[in-house]
Amino acid sequence: MESLSGYVYKAASEGRVLTLAALLHNHSEPEVRYLLNYVTQVAGQRSTPLIIAARNGHDKVVRLLVDHYKVDTEQTGTVRFDGYVIDGATALWCAAGAGHFEVVRLLLTHRANVNHTTVTNSTPLRAACFDGRLDIVRYLVEHDADIRITNKYNNTCLMIAAYKGHADVVKFLLERGADPNAKAHCGATALHFAAEAGHLEIVTELVRCQAGMVVNGHGMTPLKVAAESCKADVVELLLAHADCDPRSRIEALELLGASFANDRENYDIQRTYHYLHMAMTERHRDPDNVVAKELLPAIEAYGGRAECRTLPELEAIRADRDALHMEGLMIRERVLGSDNIDVSHPIIYRGAVYADNMEFEHCIKLWLHALRLRQKGNRNTHKDLLRFAQVFSQMVHLKERVVASPPWSRC
Ligand SMILES: *[C@@H]1O[C@H](CO)[C@@H](O)[C@H](O)[C@H]1NC(C)=O
Ligand SMILES: *[C@@H]1O[C@H](CO)[C@@H](O)[C@H](O)[C@H]1NC(C)=O
């Protein structure tokens, strides 16, 4: 029986329905039950014939199993998706996440529980939203899927679709009453996720549906998140948001310009100057009511410079790249706050550029400053120092920025 179960699993996995039928034929009912409940462990997955057939989109196999053999649709297993390991996934979850509409339809026709969640509380609907398949999302919702169930981080279906850039799914969920202002554990809303990822159409849609300009657990509004990640078009759109006061507007423009000055992928010093100039112009728009900067004390790592306070001061450094780089780092530290989790990456990046140019003293000063900021911002310094050491060695060996876990799994 043990080896027969291996053949049954393989036939289900490969969609060979005739082979599967032949293998199960002439066995007693308890034997068939044993074979179809048997959990096979292969390549980090643990699944039954039904789950693997659903995962791989073999609708004929799924039909044979649920129709003829009445296999329990609520069996769960461990499957891999896009490098993620999902525990407690049903056949429906797998089919929804892998984009197999016909399998989804079959399973729901056979009364699969549309709300059955995985161990991390992910629903089949969430899996479909991640994948961006509107047809499956719609079908699940029309079969009573609960759009309010969140994963264990209180992250909603709307958030995952917003982050992944599936505008049609976002619109559909909003039409069906998804709450645009729901907050994940980390305090982020769907608007934070869309802004960070730079999905302009989704940002527009969320704002149209009254998504608010709220701060997340790191004190960041969606506007700041967009500015910090160099999403200029999203920033320009959100500047017009109803809840955006003059100081937030100015700081967002400054943060955007500052971020363009020290980002490996988005480096653009012309845009740095452009946005810093816009911000400075806004600060001085009304000469009787100048919006003054609240400057931090000069920091040695930034060459002991002070931030520009007037247009002439800024114009004087227009062609001085190095000064603009340091201006950017100072602005980021002021606007984000020295304990912000994102503040240190560009400092480390800028240090690495110095190191590449053999300017080690500059590099070390910046890296030590970044280390101090990270210690300040994170109570768990042991873990943080380890991560920091990894960043160093990675940067030295690979010259690559280490990407933390993706936001949708963080919160
Ligand atoms: C799924 O959740 C929705 C909304 O709460 C509910 O109406 C529906 O009956 C649930 N379906 C199942 C199978 O539990
Ligand atoms: C997560 O959501 C649940 C249910 O909606 C709520 O009771 C809880 O307070 C939320 N937790 C956090 C940390 O936001």
Image (cartoon, rainbow, N blue to C red):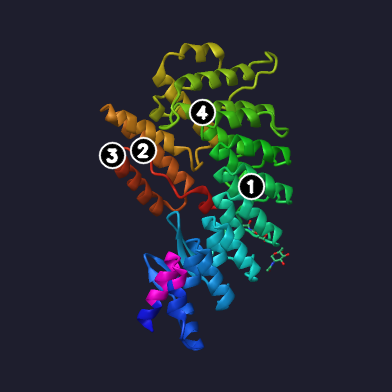
Image region (quadrant) for ligand 2:
bottom right
Which residue matches tag 4? 331
Mark 1 falls on what kind of element?
A: helix
Residue 295 is a magenta residue: no
Q: Nearer the viewer, residue 292 or 283?
A: 283
Q: Nearer the viewer, residue 241 or 378?
A: 241
Q: Main SS of the magenta segment? A: helix
Determine which quarter of the picture holds residue 263. top left
- Amino acid type at circle 4 is Ile
Q: Nearer the viewer, mark 1 or mark 2?
A: 1
Which residue matches tag 2? 368
Which residue matches tag 1? 169
Q: Which of the two labelled residues, at mark 3 and mark 4, occupies the earlier sequence position?
A: 4
Q: In the figure, is residue 194 to the left or right of 288?
A: left
Q: Nearer the viewer, mark 2 or mark 4?
A: 4
Mark 4 falls on what kind of element?
A: helix
In contact (CB < 8 Å): disc 4 and disc 1 = no
User: Is any part of residue 137 visible from this angle?
Assistant: yes
Q: Residues within 10 Å of mark 4 (few under 14, many from 20)?
A: many
Segment colored magenta: 6-18
In contact (CB < 8 Å): disc 3 and disc 1 = no
> Residue at (56%, 15%) from the top-left corner?
310
Q: Which of the two labelled residues, at mark 4 and mark 1, occupies the earlier sequence position?
A: 1
Q: Residues within 10 Å of mark 2 (few under 14, many from 20)?
A: some
Rounded to the nearest whole Å, what is the CA distance between mark 2 and mark 4?
Answer: 18 Å
Mark 3 falls on what kind of element?
A: helix
Q: Which mark is residue 396?
A: 3
